[in-house]
Image (cartoon, grey):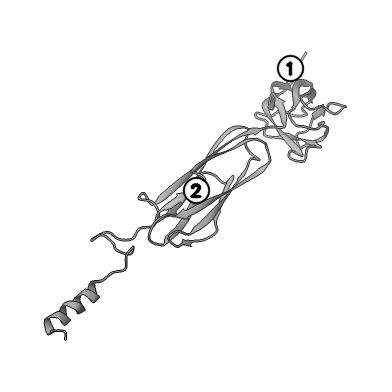
Amino acid sequence: MTTPRGAIAMALAILIWVPAGSQQKPGVKPAAKLVVLEGTQFDFGKIYRGSVMERTLTLKNAGTDTLVMGNIGVSCGCTGAMVTAERIPPGGTGSVRITFNSKNFTGPVHKTVTLNSNGDSLGYTTIEFTASVIDEIGLNPQSIIVPGAEVNKTSTVMLTVANNGMTPLSLTGFRTQLKGLVLKLPPDPIPPGGTGEIRAEFTPEAPANMLTEGVFVTTNNMRQPEVYLQVYGGVRQAKSP
């Protein structure tokens, strides 16, 4: 027969018993922990200008509390990011899809994506990516400069076009609102790795302190169907003979 004192001791033991594996240290609250399984840095490598690249990374909650994802910050409008789940349970996983539009870039690129959450002591986790953007259509110079243009006199500028792509490049035409500007384009396709020449002839009809127009050159390149050339300089009245 159990004595009153024994019954009380047994009741207290039942009340304070906690299943193994669920004990928490006094004063320590459960915490979420965000881990990017593939790492927080990656490289898209060499890509052609105009390409839209995509990478999906796995997000794991390595903590003991629910991981709550907040807003996502990106370093520029060229980058997009979206998570598959706003709440990830302990031990669970989700993902973030990162996209990069290379349309307005040439050369080395470094961008960041910031994941705000309760899974880091700082309140955020930064993902970095790099890329090397290759311009399939290279122009040298990259603009038309006519600093000494005169009314009714023709100024000529020569430009070199490099085909950095994998298929023959054809320059099919041009359009501009700048009166007096004419482009003479290469008559034949430029082979991969080859170069051609553009002859720009500008015969202005009226004086202008500063030229603010440019010219679009159309091509057969699907990623760069048009190439824009800004025209810099001014036009003065021709001197009397």
- Horizontal and vertical percent for residue 241? 78, 13
Relative to residue 211, is residue 66 drawn left or right? left
- Horizontal and vertical percent for residue 240? 76, 16
Relative to residue 129, is residue 27 drawn left or right? left
**What whole-number distance in Å separates the C-alpha atoms at marks 2 and 1?**
71 Å
Tell which residue pokes out farthest to the right in this image.
187
Residue 239 badge: 1
- Horizontal and vertical percent for residue 186? 84, 26
Of residues 105 and 140, the one drawn nearer to the viewer in this rendering: 105
Residue pointed to by mark 2: 37
Q: Is residue 115 above or below residue 141?
A: below
Residue sitting at x 77%, y 32%: 166
Decide which of tag 2 and tag 1 comes sooner along the chain: 2
Residue sitting at x 76%, y 21%: 158
Position of the N terminus, as image quadrant, is bottom left
Tag 1: amino acid: Lys
Q: Secondary structure beneath disc 1?
A: loop
Tell which residue pokes out farthest to the bottom in this image.
1
Residue sitting at x 75%, y 21%: 157
Crowd band around label 1 with a 10 angstrom C-alpha radius: few (<14), some (14–19), many (20+): few
Residue 77 badge: none
